[in-house]
Image (cartoon, rainbow, N blue to C red):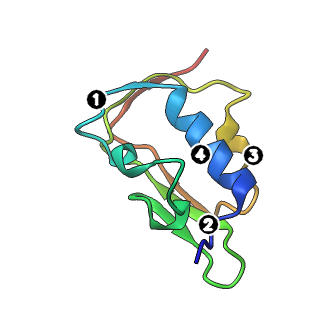
Amino acid sequence: MHLCRPYQKDALLEFKNEFHYNVMAGKTESWRNNTDCCSWKGISCDPKTGNVVELDLQDSFLNGPLRSNSSLFRLQHLQTLDLGLNNLTGN
């Protein structure tokens, strides 16, 4: 059963592609289109609604700018966000 909401999965995959990262080292390695995003590393979903409520990408080797129009901001139900220990910049 897939719990993840499709538009949130799309936003997460877009977010993943916004950065340069070491594919073999980060949590986003498990993020694949044919799997439920609620099972991805670093993602927690509300078990009743399927909404993404937590994103923990601490120390995920993300490099690049966090844009003001990032798809991350489409995750309206997000309650916890950890992007620490990455190499993120503003634009």
Q: Label 4 near label 2: C-beta < 8 Å?
A: no
Label 1 Cα crowd, 10 Å radius (few <14 / some 14-19 / many 20+):
some
What whole-number distance in Å separates the C-alpha atoms at marks 3 and 1? 24 Å
- Nearer to us of marks 3 and 1 is 1
Amino acid found under the numbered disc labelled 2:
Val
N-term-proximal mark, 3 vs 2:
2
Task: Name which residue lies at 28% across and 29% down.
Answer: 22
What whole-number distance in Å separates the C-alpha atoms at marks 2 and 1? 25 Å
Going by the image, does 5 lie left or right of 55?
right
Q: Which mark is residue 12?
A: 4
Q: Quadrant of residue 50?
A: bottom right
Q: Position of residue 76 (x, y in %)?
A: 76, 56
Task: Name which residue lies at 64% across and 24% down.
Answer: 67
Find disc 3 in the rendering and name its residue: 74
N-term-proximal mark, 3 vs 1:
1
Find disc 1 in the rendering and name its residue: 22
Amino acid found under the numbered disc labelled 1:
Asn
Secondary structure at badge 1 equals: loop
Amino acid found under the numbered disc labelled 4:
Leu
Secondary structure at badge 3 equals: helix
The C terminus is located in which quarter? top right
Secondary structure at badge 4 equals: helix
N-term-proximal mark, 2 vs 4:
4
N-term-proximal mark, 4 vs 3:
4
